Amino acid sequence: MTHNIEEVTFEELEATDVISVELVPERKGLILKHCEYYVSSRRHGTTVTRRYNEFVQLYDVLYAKYPYRAVCSLPPKRVVVGGGSPLFLQRRRAALQRWLTLVARHPVLAHDADLRTFLCETSPRLDKPKHDEFILAGTQEDNAGDLSTDEMQESFVSEQEQLRLAHLGLGRLFKIFEKVEGRCDAERTDIRELGAALNALSSPAVADTARWSRMRDAMKAAAELAIETGETQLEVTEEEAMDGMLLALDAVGAYRQLCSRLTRGLHAERAAAAAAAPQCAAARALRARHRYALRCAVEEARIARVYALSALELLPELLRTLGTAHARVAAVWADLHTALRHPNAKQTARD
C-alpha cells in the first residue's frame, strides 16, 4: 500500500469521481426527525441511501487510518424537533457533498476499501482499522529524487504559511461575493416594493384631471415593470463558481487542520526519537514515521494548492456574472424612469 503523489491537476482530480448527495424527500422519525441522503458515485455507478451518522462512521475510519492526510471535518449535526429548517438542511447537504467529493477525488483516499463500501454497499459495515496508513504501507525505499527530511521540514513550514494566506484570502473573497449577492437580492425586493407602492398610487379617482390621469397611467406602467422585475430571479453569482470556491475553502481548511495536528505530533516524535538510543528499533521506527508524515504533508500541500488555484481561476466568471447582474439592475432603474416619463416607450431591462 504505497502511494507517491506527484504534481496533480484539478482536471485529474475532478475526473476521479463525481459525487452527488441529495436529500430524501421524506424525513424519518416521529418527534426528532432525521434526514436520509441519496449518495451517488459516477465512478462506481451506484446510488445508496445514507444517514448523517453513517458519514460520521466513514469519517472516523478514514481519520484513524490516514492520520497524515487532509480529511476535512464534517458539517455539524443539529438535533432539532421537527428536523431543522430547510436552509440548514440544504447547507448541510451541500457540505456533505463537498466533503465526500474531496474524499472520493483524493489520490489516496479514493482507493480506500471502506470508502468503496460506503459508496456501493446497501448496508455498509465500517470497522475502526487496527493499523494506520504508515503501518499498512510497510517499509518504503527512498528514491534518488526524494527530498531529505530537512528539506521536507522546510517545505512543510513554508507551505503552511502560504496556504494559510490563501485560505484567508479565499474566505474574504467568498464573503464579499455573498454580501454582493445579498445586496442585489435586497435591491430586487426594493424594486418589487416600489412597484406595489406605485400600483397603489395609480388607482383612478373621480376627481382626476387629465394631468392626474396621465400621471396615474405612467405610475401603472412603471408599477407593472417593477413588480415583474421584482419577481424575476436575477443570477447574481455563478452557482458553480461559488461551489468551487467553497470546495477550495474546505480543501485548504482541511490541510490547515492537518498541519495543526502534525505540528504537535512531529514535535513529540522528534523528542521521543532523540530520547531513545540512536540505533534502537524504536528510534528508527519513530524517525521513519516522522519522515513518512512529512512526505504526506508535502503531498497534501500539493493537493490543497490545486484546489486553491482552481477557485482563483473561477474569479473571471464570477466577476462577469456580477457585472451582468448589476447592469441588469441599472437597466431596470433606467426603464422605470422611462416608464414614468414615457409610459408607452419600449423597455430594455426585459429584453
Image (cartoon, rainbow, N blue to C red):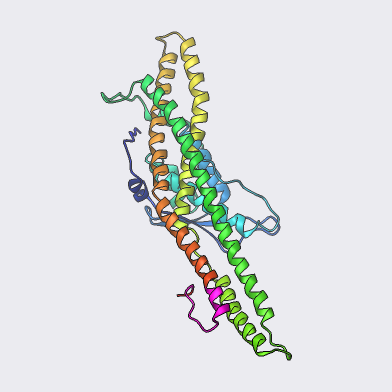
Residue 200: quadrant of the picture: bottom right
Which of these two is toward me, 218 or 308? Answer: 218
Residue 307 at x, y percent in the picture: 41, 43
Relative depth, front residue between 32 and 91: 91
Q: Quadrant of the C terminus?
A: bottom left
Instruction: Please say whether residue 204 is one of the residues in the magenta stretch.
Output: no
* Quadrant assignment for the N terminus: top left
x and y, in percent, of residue 107 in the image: 37, 41
What is the total number of numbered labels drawn onto the structure image? 0
Q: Find residue 73 and report its image quarter.
A: top right
Identify the residue at image location x=33%, y=25%.
Answer: 140
Q: Is residue 291 above or below residue 83?
A: above
Does the rendering let one see residue 199?
Answer: yes
- Comparing 299 with 314, the one in front is 314
Residue that sits furthest to the bottom in the current view: 206
What residue is at 42 percent from the left and 51 percent from the top? 315
Magenta-colored span: 335-349
The quadrant in which residue 142 appears is top left
